[in-house]
Amino acid sequence: MTYSDEVQDISGKDFSFLEQLMEANINMLFVGDFFQHTYNTSLDGNVNKNLFDDPIKYMKRFEDKGVTPDTTTLLNSWRCSRTICDYISANLGIRMSSNRTDNTVIQIVSAPEKIERILCDESIVKLHYQNSAKYGPSHKNWGDTKGEDCYGNVCVMLNKSTMQKYNAGKLSELAPLTRNKLYVAITRSRENVYFVRE
């Protein structure tokens, strides 16, 4: 059996090579989350340029090579609460649910004193769209936390364009890469998520 993880980041000519491997007469298991595509293994001009534009077309590429997509086995999160999963499904348009039965908090924080407490609490990771290094050690970029599983409370800093979509109730209309990175950031939380305007 051959296993490939984080398959959603395989791009360009690397994806063409992966398709060639799919033709081999061996058992293969590919694991990935289309909506966690935040990184490209290669950028090769127009080769597979539109690969991540549409999840249905993406899955069809696998089906055309005889690989059967399974979109249900890993649908339930062990990390995120039902509150977080419901929020992702309703606001980002990414279907997910939880194996947990508890509820946590996901909310916008605007009171200056509460923002200051969150920013001063080093146990709460602060996640930015980009340029997190200039803020200090408890700050990271949204997409850079993919695969990390060690956070309780998470503070997601919303940049101007994301804040506008949040206020309009249109987070699902963010540019796909931005939406994916926000999805990654929110789903790092095992406990509560606080949104703060950057």
Image: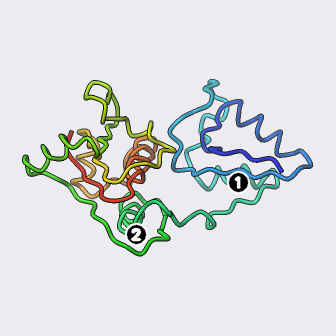
Q: Which residue is mark 1?
A: 60
Q: In the image, residue 184 lies at what x, y percent?
A: 44, 48
Q: Residue at x 25, y 29 (%)?
A: 135
Any mark on residue 139, and which?
A: none
Amino acid found under the numbered disc labelled 1: Lys
Q: Between 101 and 93, which is closer to the camera in this rendering?
A: 101
Check disc 2: other Cα within 10 Å, few if <14, some if 14-19, many if 20+: many
Q: State which tag comes first along the sequence, 1 or 2.
A: 1
Rendered image quadrant of residue 89: bottom left
Check disc 1: other Cα within 10 Å, few if <14, some if 14-19, many if 20+: some
Q: Between 166 and 31, which is closer to the camera in this rendering?
A: 31
Q: Is 61 left, or right, of 91 in this rendering?
A: right
Q: CA distance from mark 1 to mark 2?
A: 30 Å
Q: In the image, residue 180 lies at what x, y percent?
A: 45, 46
Farthest residue, direction bottom: 101
In the displayed structure, would residue 5 be above or below residue 45? below
Any mark on residue 82, and which?
A: 2
- In front: label 1 or label 2: 2
In the displayed structure, would residue 187 be above or below residue 197? below
Q: Is 65 left, or right, of 84 in this rendering?
A: right
Q: Residue at x 27, y 58 (%)?
A: 169
Amino acid found under the numbered disc labelled 2: Arg
In the displayed structure, would residue 171 be above or below residue 53? below
Q: Residue at x 61, y 67 (%)?
A: 72
Q: In the image, residue 8 lies at what x, y percent?
A: 61, 44
Rendered image quadrant of residue 100: bottom left
Q: In the image, residue 158 lies at what x, y percent?
A: 26, 43
Q: Is 13 left, or right, of 36 in this rendering?
A: right
In the displayed structure, would residue 112 be above or below residue 104? above
